[in-house]
Amino acid sequence: MTTTIRAPKHTITALVQDKPGVLNRVSSMFRRRGFNIVSLAVGHSEIPGLSRMTFVVEGDDAIVEQVTKHLHKLIDVIKVADISQDNVVSRELALIRVNSNAHTRSEIMQIVDIFRANIVDVAPESVVIEVTGDEEKVDSLTNLLRSFGVAEVMRTGTIAMSRGTGAGGPAPSNSSKVRLEGGV
């Protein structure tokens, strides 16, 4: 029996300008440097004109330090935070299509209830389940449903936020806002 030792996962957030090409520049930086992105989620932030990216990367502390240094160098990146050591709230959303019929549907519904998930679509031969939680919860539910036949899985990737004021901290200072408004 062989055991595979996986590198630790780290969560990094970046506040970036919300404009075309930013995601491409960020992902190209990862590609050029040979960093693997385990998960990537992007969405609008609380500040108009800025988006927040959440990356999950595998590697030791040196890798994470390199990732954050290279992110800081990108012109469209305003702020980067490694929140791996923080007390964080992290969630992922998944949609799981499971084969079902009249005989298996009630058992699937019971499993879905235990995981506090929802059935969001029912068809004669399948159901679509929506689950929100940490990566382990999504993995556990998916594994339990495999015996029924998992036809398709779609996951958002992890989003995370420090509890309290945390590493994400307040919005950029006024000097940062002036820099944003004046161009980069």
Image (cartoon, rainbow, N blue to C red):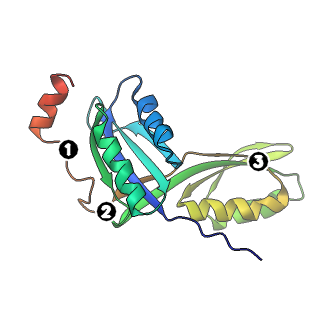
Count all numbered tags in the image, as a single digit. Answer: 3
Quadrant including the N terminus? bottom right
Q: In the rendered view, would you say 157 is above or below 90?
A: above
Say which mark, if any, is on residue 163: 2
**Disc 3 marks which residue?**
127
Question: What kind of residue is marked 3?
Answer: Val
Find numbered disc 2 in the image and state the secondary structure of the residue it sits on: loop
**What is the residue that sits farthest to the left in this orientation?**
175
Residue positioned 10% across, 37% down in the render: 174
Above/below status of 33 relative to 11:
above
Q: Is residue 53 visible?
A: yes
Give the mark nearest the N terminus, 2 or 1.
2
Where is residue 94? Give x, y as percent. Answer: 61, 49
Counting from the top left corner in percent of width and height, residue 31 is at 50, 39
Q: Nearer the viewer, residue 76 or 131?
A: 76
Q: In the image shown, does 37 or 98 lie closer to the viewer?
A: 37
Residue 87, position as x, y percentages in the image: 34, 67
Of the two numbered discs 1 and 3 in the rendering, the one whose residue sits closer to the viewer: 1
Label 1 residue SS? loop
Element carrying mark 3 = strand
- Residue hosting label 1: 171
Disc 2 marks which amino acid? Arg
Q: Residue at x 53, y 64 (%)?
A: 7
**Residue 116 at least partly seen:** no
Q: Earlier in the sequence, mark 1 or mark 3?
A: 3
Mark 3 residue crowding within 10 angstroms, few (<14) / some (14–19) / many (20+):
many
Q: Measure the alpha-carbon separation of dots 3 and 2.
A: 35 Å
Kindly identify the amino acid type of the residue bearing the numbered disc 1: Ala
